[in-house]
Image: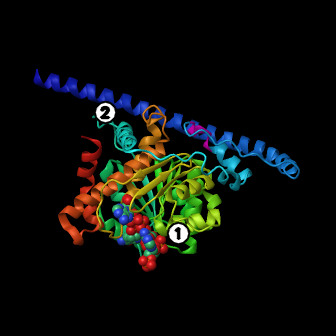
Amino acid sequence: MMEKFLQQSMDTDEKFYRFEEQRLKIEDKRREAEHARELQMLQMLGQMLAGISSSVSQRSQSIPTSPPRRANHRSYADNFNYNAMTATLSPPIVIERSFSLHRTHTLKDMENIFQLVRNVIPPLTGKKHKGQDGRIGIVGGCREYTGAPYFAAITALKVGADLSHVFCTKDAATVIKSYSPELIVHPVLDSPNAVHEVEKWLPRLHSVVIGPGLGRDEVLLENAKGIIEKSKMKGIPIIIDADGLWLISQQPSLIQGYQRAILTPNYMEFSRLYEAMLRDPVDSSDHHGCVLRLSQAMGNLTVVQKGERDLISDGEKVLVCSHEGSSRRCGGQGDLLSGSLGVLAHWAFVAGAEKTNGQNPFLVAAFGACSLTRQSNQQAFQKFGRSMTASDMVSEVGTAFNKLFET
Ligand SMILES: NC(=O)C1=CN([C@@H]2O[C@H](COP(=O)(O)OP(=O)(O)OC[C@H]3O[C@@H](n4cnc5c(N)ncnc54)[C@H](OP(=O)(O)O)[C@@H]3O)[C@@H](O)[C@H]2O)[C@@H](O)CC1
Ligand SMILES: Nc1ncnc2c1ncn2[C@@H]1O[C@H](COP(=O)(O)OP(=O)(O)OP(=O)(O)O)[C@@H](O)[C@H]1O
């Protein structure tokens, strides 16, 4: 009797998994078709806009061009359209609108945003398979910097991603692998066909974080550039941090107008980007205005200016995250932020506008990642004080996440 029951139960399980496998295959095919459609639209729009651009440039000699209407944040399928527009109509036009949309949020709004972060977190159920809650790629890690990509990748796992890949140089790979058996490490970033090697994995990745520990070697930066281009073509959310931001400050058009990108500059990186884009030094009496202007100049992609208070803007709104952290500033905290943002950006993006109450999902994700990093910092500092390091913060990510988002 018992045997029969067990057999029946096994059969039911097997049927369920077979059904689930079929469903996932269909879902994969649907996503591929969607990507192909987006690509086709991009090409068509490119051709159309090339035509419009030549007529606009002819007309603009006699008639002043009016500012382009900003793409609706809620319509993320329109990103490619907007990309093409910002490339055709130059960014200074957007900059002219800088203060008209300036809006700062109150404490009550902040609590509401916490609730939106909670809304986008996928529930843990017994019905999912490995990978469904996030496959994140980290592009970075070279001979000098092996810690940064490790911190980003392990944090992505601790936040709740199922798989975390690191694409780094050959000599960094063994070191990173030895820190953690949980990470999947690809020693490809300095190989002659690096972009192709990473591109092969892109269809399996939900988001990529470019820059932690990348370094400034010309070859590696060129490969990072190629990977950004391929990721954009696939519509993957891209988080750009550290040396990835160095690359962007040299070639802003690489990411300008791609609204699935989030930039996470620290003080120095922000100044570099701001000066490159706005040809002016940062106005230290107006941090809000500066972050708003930088986002607009970049084509309204999300900018997270890290510091004593984190300022987050999509060029329309400025959110302030001043969640209590600590006075300890050990290296690697920004890597925890970019790794957690890799996961949260993916979750918020797929959750859709209903779950984010119509808010830009990347603002919601950035607010979540900043709060989480600061909470992890606070908890680790309470335990270790001055001797606290980034690894101590990594150990706190799970409890910090529960405290903020699962209570
Ligand atoms: N364990 C590892 O592997 C780690 C590796 N990492 C990796 O290192 C790479 C380089 O990143 P980075 O941030 O050190 O380079 P960069 O932007 O040139 O800054 C350099 C100078 O800027 C200044 N400065 C910085 N912040 C400032 C502030 N708030 N306010 C004022 N000034 C400020 C400060 O100048 P100073 O104090 O010397 O005058 C600082 O020395 C990158 O790949 C990153 O991922 C890190 O992630 C850490 C853990
Ligand atoms: N003065 C501060 N007070 C409180 N929190 C801060 C302060 N400065 C930075 N942080 C927090 O530390 C985190 C990382 O910011 P930081 O400026 O250290 O980045 P980073 O320089 O890119 O880090 P990394 O060392 O990883 O390169 C952010 O979440 C930010 O909110």
Compare residues 49 and 117 and report the one nearer the observer.
117
**Left or right of 366 in this view: 301:** right
Magenta segment includes 76: yes
Q: Position of residue 126 (x, y in %)?
A: 27, 34
Return the residue nearer the eye: 229 or 108. Answer: 108
Tell me the SS state at disc 2.
loop
**Label 1: element kind:** loop
Magenta-highlighted residues: 75-79
Does residue 192 appear anywhere in the picture? no
- On screen, residue 134 above or below 212: above
Quarter of the image with the C terminus is top left
- The circle drawn on residue 21 is none
Q: Residue furthest top?
A: 1
Q: Amino acid at mark 2?
A: Lys
Q: Which residue is mark 1?
A: 191
Residue 235 x, y percent position in the rendering: 56, 46
